[in-house]
Amino acid sequence: MIWVKRKPAPPLSDFVEILWYCESNHVPHRMERVLPTGTTELVVNLNEDVARVYDRENLQQVRRLRGTILCGPHSQFFVLDTTQQRHVAGVHFKPGGAFAFFRPPAAEFHNTHVEAEDIWGGASRSLREQLLEQPSPERVLDVLERWLLSLAPADRRRHPAVDYALRCFNAAPHVAMVGSVTDRTGFSARHFIDVFTGQVGITPKRFCRVRRFQRVLQHIHGGHQVRWTDVAAAGGYSDQAHFIHDFRSFSGLTPSDYLAARTPWLNHVPLND
């Protein structure tokens, strides 16, 4: 496998976590569930010009999109055909980072996959072809970086209240914090929710729940012996039943099932046929 990632330079670093490239001939399983992170991803399939999006409840139902897509901020898992990962490149945006590169509110992309051309029109039509022409992963990332720079308006910035809230929520993603953070912004609850959701793509409470779920995954992913009561307490859950309910709602799995099926990739879990 070839896996290359890069942290971009400013000003992109304000909005983008990493640019990445992956190439692999090994597909260990046919399908997998991708767990929610609350962030947005641009994905370019360099193996074939198609992206297949499956219905979570009925895998016989599938949408076929062009191979350059925006995966909006998810608060539920989605199902991925692993052949789409043979040769891919993409952009992993920071929470609240993707909004700088398009005009619609980020909430319009919640739990959705959208063809890049529907968002950026002609600006995205040649991107995949340019990437395919590059002789190395590093050059692929160069093209992605230049393309993003061409899209981002110089004056596009997160709202200060959103920046402040994200710092608080990422440090301690507890739902109970939302009210106190809202109070410190000086906004009404309704106005803060609207501003936050418009730029991050999901409501503050749901964002905290997803990020808390992600923190739990990081805690248990590499562990060999896990005490679930300790994990629930460390995650800020009031009891183990609440912890299990949240875990299932985001992943479709029990915590024990996740551990049994985990792969080296934190958020990618094989789906039984």
Image (cartoon, rainbow, N blue to C red):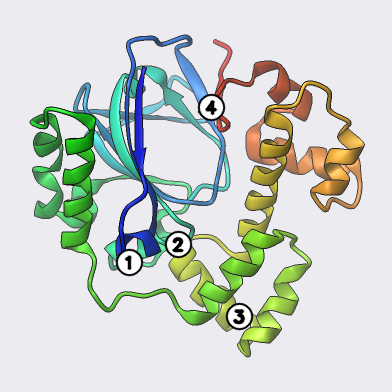
Measured Cα–Cα span from mark 2 to mark 3: 15 Å
- Badge 3 vs badge 1, beta-carbon distance below 8 Å: no
Q: Name the amino acid, label 3.
A: Arg
Instruction: Work out how far the residue at label 4 is from the one at label 3, CA to CA, in angstroms.
Output: 37 Å
Residue 5 falls left or right of residue 139: right
**Label 3, on which residue?**
190
Residue under pointer 4 = 265
Q: Earlier in the sequence, mark 2 or mark 3?
A: 2
Question: Residue flagged by tag 1: what amino acid is it?
Answer: Ala
Name which of mark 2 and mark 1 comes first in the sequence: 1
- Residue type at mark 2? Ala
- The residue beneath circle 2 is 107
Looking at the rendered structure, the secondary structure element under dot 3 is helix
Q: Looking at the image, is 147 positioned above or below residue 133? A: below
CA distance for labels 4 and 2 = 27 Å
Disc 4 to disc 2: CB gap under 8 Å: no
Front label number (1 vs 4): 4
Mark 2 lies on a secondary structure that is: helix
Q: Nearer the viewer, residue 39 or 109?
A: 39
Residue 201 visible to an observer of this rendering: yes
Residue, disc 1: 100
Q: Position of residue 42 (x, y in %)?
A: 32, 45
Q: Nearer the viewer, mark 4 or mark 3?
A: 4
